[in-house]
Image (cartoon, rainbow, N blue to C red):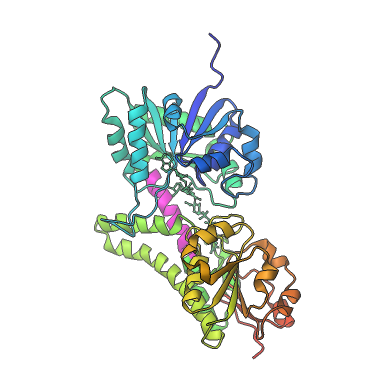
Amino acid sequence: MSAPKFSKNILCIGAGYVGGPTMAVIAAKCPQYKVTVVDINAARINAWNSDNLPIYEPGLLDVVKQARGRNLFFSTDVDAAIKEAQIIFVSVNTPTKTFGEGAGKAADLQYWELTARNIVKVAAENKIIIEKSTLPVKTAEAMGRILNANEKGIKFEVLSNPEFLAEGTAIEDLERPDRVLIGSQLTPEGIKARDEVVEIYANWVPNEKILTSNIWSSELSKLVANAFLAQRISSINSISALCEKTDANVSEVSRAIGMDTRIGSKFLSSSVGFGGSCFQKDILNLVYICQSYGLTEVADYWERVVLMNEYQKRRFVQNMLKVMFNTVAGKRIALFGFAFKADTGDTRESPAIDVAKQLIEEHAKVVITDPQALDNAKIDLADYADKIEFIADPYEAAKGAHAIAVMTEWKEYKALDYKRIFSSMERPSFIFDGRNILNHEELFKTGFNVFPLGQPNHKHF
Ligand code: NAD
Ligand code: UGA
C-alpha cells in the first residue's frame, strides 16, 4: 500500500470571509496537509472554484491559485469531508439573534449547533473540533456535550481558535498575525489536541506568537479584543463632536494622544461610525453575557460603545441637514463609498446603510457609488430601489448633485479630479468628508463648502 499523500486532513465548515481566506493561507503554507472547505451555499462554493471569488480581498486570488486543486479543495459535500477529516474548523456565521430570548443582543448559535449535530451524525472516529467562529464564552461546554453525547464511542475534543483577521488586510493578517490564540481544556487529551493545532500554525507563525490558554479565556478574549477596538473608535468619535464645538481638530488630537506609547496610534481615526459584521454583534453579545451574569454596570459600560456609534451616524446626517439649509428634500446627494471600510466589498452593518436610509427619509435623491460594493449595496437597499441610483463612475454619480458625502476611505477618492466634479454640481456645492481623507483646503479653493468630521469647516458663506 502506498503512503497517504497528505499527513493531515483538515476541514473547514463555512466558506465565508473567514473560512475561505484562513484555509487558503493554511493550504498555501502547508502543502503536506489536505485542506477542504465546505459550505451549504453552492453558489459560494462555485465562486471559490472560479477566478471570480465570492469576496474581494487584496492578494486572496493569488493565494487561492497557489493551492487550489493541489491541497486546497472547495466542496458542497459536507458529509464526505467530515468523514475523512481529523481536524475540523467550524467557521459558520454567528449573527445577533433576531428572535426570542436575547433578541437583538445574544448570539444566534443555531448554525453552529446544526453543524455540531451533523458532525456527530456523520463521524466514524475521534476528531478535534475547533471553534473558529466568534462565540459566547462557555459555548465549548455546550458543544462538547452535544458532540460527546453519541452512542458510537467517538470522542471529540473541542478547542477555541478565534480569528483576528480584519477584512481588507486578511491575507497580510493571516500570513503575519500579531498572535494566534489556541484555547483548550487543560486535560491531557485537551493539551494533546491543542499541540496538534499549534503544529499547524508553527509551519509559518513564530513560536512566541502562538499563545495557548484555557478555553474560556480564549473564547472571551475574542469578544474583548473586538470590544476594545470598537471602544477606541467610539471614544475618538465622541471627541470629534466636541472638536466641532470648540474649533479643535480631531486629527490633531488623535496624533497627539496616539504618540503616547501607552495609548498607541492605531484605531484612532474618527469616522462616520464603525461598521462590519462583528464589532456591533460581538459587543452586544458581551453585553448580553454580562447581563445574564447580573453584571448590570459592566453591561451598561460596554453598551455605550454601540450607542455612541449610533449617535455618530445620526449626527452625521443631522449636520448635513443643518448645513444644507435644513432641507435635503429633492436634492441629489452622492455617497462616495458604501463598503464598511476600504478594500472590501462587504457592506454588513456599513454606516452608509444608515446614512442612505436617513437621507431617503428626508426625501433626498440618493446616488451611491463604490468600486467593489455596489452589488451588496443593491441588496441592502432593495426596499428603496426606486429611490436610489447606483452608479459605478464617481464622476457620473456626482453630476448634478448638491452634495457629496464620503462614506468609505477608498484611496481612489483622493485621486479624483475635484475641479471637474465641482463644475458638474449644483451650487452651493457641499462635501461632507465622513472619513477625513480629502484635501480640504484644496477643495475649498476649488469652490466647495467643506465639512470634515471633528475639524473646523471651510465655507464660502
Ligand atoms: P460568513 O457569513 O461570510 O460565512 C459563513 C458561512 O457559513 C456561509 O457561507 C454559510 O453558508 C456557511 N454555513 C452556515 N451554516 C452552515 C452549515 N450548517 N454547513 C456548512 N456551511 C454553513 O461569515 P464570516 O464573516 O466568515 O464569519 C464567520 C465567523 O467568523 C463569525 O462567527 C464571525 O463572527 C467570525 N469572524 C469574522 C471575521 C470577519 O472579518 N468577517 C473576522 C473574525 C471572526
Ligand atoms: C475587526 C477587527 O479589526 C478584527 O481584528 C476582527 O477579527 C474582526 O473585526 C472580526 O471579528 O470580524 P473588521 O471589522 O474586518 O475587523 O475591520 P476593522 O479594520 O476593524 O474596521 C471596523 C470598522 O471600524 C470599519 O467600519 C472601519 O472603517 C472603522 N474604523 C476603524 C474607524 O472608524 N476608525 C479607525 O480608526 C479604525
| Residue 409 found in image quarter | bottom right
Specify whether residue 231 is painted magenta: yes
The secondary structure that dominates the magenta segment is: helix
Where residue 14 appears, as percent x and y from the top left, is 46, 41
Specify whether residue 174 is painted magenta: no
Task: Choose between 225 and 358: the one closer to the eye.
Answer: 358
Residue with the most extreme front position: 386
**Residue at the spot x=37%, y=38% of the render?**
115
Answer above or below: position of 133 versus 326.
above
| Residue 417 found in image quarter | bottom right
Where residue 330 appears, as percent x and y from the top left, is 55, 81
Magenta segment: 217-233
Task: Choose between 107 and 164: the one closer to the eye.
Answer: 107
| Residue 371 found in image quarter | bottom right
Answer yes or no: is residue 209 visible: no
Where residue 344 appears, as percent x and y from the top left, is 58, 54
**Residue at the spot x=66%, y=73% of the render?**
398
Using residue 449 as the reference point, say whether residue 11 is left or right of it.
left
Where residue 335 appears, as percent x and y from the top left, is 59, 70
**Residue at the spot x=35%, y=36% of the render?**
116
Using residue 348 as the reference point, say whether residue 213 is left or right of it.
left
